[in-house]
Amino acid sequence: MKRILVGGFSHETNTFNPVPTGADIFRRDIRCGAHAVAGNPHGCISGFAEVIGQHGGEVELLGSVSAAARPGGIVTDTAFNDVAGLLHETLARVEADAVYLDLHGAMVTESHLDGEGTLLERVRRQVGPGIPIAVTLDMHATLTPLMVRNADIVSVYRCYPHTDMPDRGREAARLLLRTLRGEIKPVTALAKPPLLIGPPLNILPQDMPMQLTYERACEMERTVPGVLLACPAQGFMQQDVPEAGVGVVVTADTDQGLAQRMADELGDLMFAHRREYWVHLPDAGDAVRLAMNSGTPPVAISDGGDNIGAGTPGDGTALLAEILRQGVDTAFAQIWDPEAAERAAHAGVGATVTLDVGGKSHPLYGPPVRVTGRVSRVSDPNRMFRSARLEVGGVTLLLNAVAVGPNTLDHPQAMGVRPETYRMSVCKGGFAFRVAYPPDVYSYVLSATPGFSSTDLSTFTYERIRRPIYPLDEM
Ligand SMILES: [Zn+2]
């Protein structure tokens, strides 16, 4: 029986966020041994394990380690060595016939600008050239030559929001099985057009012009003999690393030249439309005005600079300040502010409190906003983190001791908030919140608020990125 070693290590690193991501954060969500395989049912590993499970007599899975942390600042060396160390330990202990790694593709550590490339290079060195390595990556992976050179099969998410992770795991499993049986000999090639893309408009796989690239990629897989996988990756623009920007990785059977030609074709296609991905987004004041005048409420407003899913703190006050300043009649917002949450909770339900909320993590997210409101609900400390619901006129504020992203409504609902009953809601996300705030209920206003995930590139200083690159340079 053949044995496949399975591991996972994920982080999307925002190098403009000065707060490092330490080992303690990964340790909160680390699974070892068999637990590394039986993890998140919506993740890549579950899809991978499902397919392998259908071939039980043929292959067995050996779980190593699976660890993930929420997007944030640079990963510390201790954190990286912690998780990578466990992976290398397992690899040294067992004799694996193949390796499958579920990675993000945009990890930057204190010592390594290309976290996944470094990891894959070390794994390759450890197992030797004859052992196939399959990898699944996030749509926002920053593809690098080091990563692609050290992986035989690379599958990248194609859906935004990322609902296709199990499918990518299944795909990787099928190809790895065929490789182990000797039916195929996968090779990979990379294209890196000099292009940064950012705001979540026109770049979704289902939106023009990005749709063209994804359609052609699928067509290649269906119609070009020898192409096993054709995967565009969008990169993560809040990263100052040499390879930041988009990329394409193609996995082909045996034919390196074919893989390279197909990758280049997709890269050229993405680059040809470079001027169409960038759209101007309104600032906080204009965004609130647009939402206020919308004929189709409720409106979900994106807080582009404080996109928690892109590694920001979640305490930005730009939109809240405008909502209060413009006297919006009904609105809903959440702010990460442990201190304010504690004070409101301590005052208790029914109390009226005056608090300076949010804007404490970094000057870009401030200043704090002074509000006076009535505490209408306090979280049950036995069931969740500290959270207090404050009614400031018609504005409902959730003050949370942890940063709560907008991609599910679990927390607001637990606090009795139904966002659809407000004229507007502030969503501290890019655009993946469309699942929780669906288009049949909400209209959308995307905004370019300040912060580490701003969609305004002029707010960042890039020092390491390769030049020239569009749109930093005219090309
Ligand atoms: Zn992503």
Image (cartoon, grey):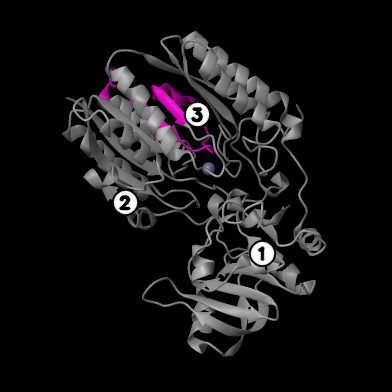
Q: Please, is residue 302 above or below residue 472 in the view?
A: below
What residue is disc 2 on?
Answer: 30
Left or right position of 291 against 378: right
**Residue 229 percent coordinates (x, y):** 48, 22
Residue drawn at 77 percent across, 63 percent down: 288
What residue is disc 1 on?
Answer: 425
**Residue 321 percent coordinates (x, y):** 72, 70
Magenta stretch bounds: 127-155
Q: Inspect this view and state whether residue 363 appears.
A: no
Which marked residue is nearer to the observer: mark 1 or mark 2? 1
Check disc 2: other Cα within 10 Å, few if <14, some if 14-19, many if 20+.
some
**Residue 257 percent coordinates (x, y):** 50, 9
Q: Amino acid at mark 2?
A: Ile
Residue drawn at 30 percent across, 29 percent down: 99
Q: Please, is residue 228 above or below residue 322 in the view?
A: above
Q: State which quadrant residue 336 falls in.
A: bottom right
For the N terminus, the image quarter is top left
Q: State which quadrant residue 124 falls in.
A: top left
- CA gap, disc 3 and disc 2: 26 Å
148 and 179: which is toward the camera = 179
- Membership of 78 in magenta stretch: no
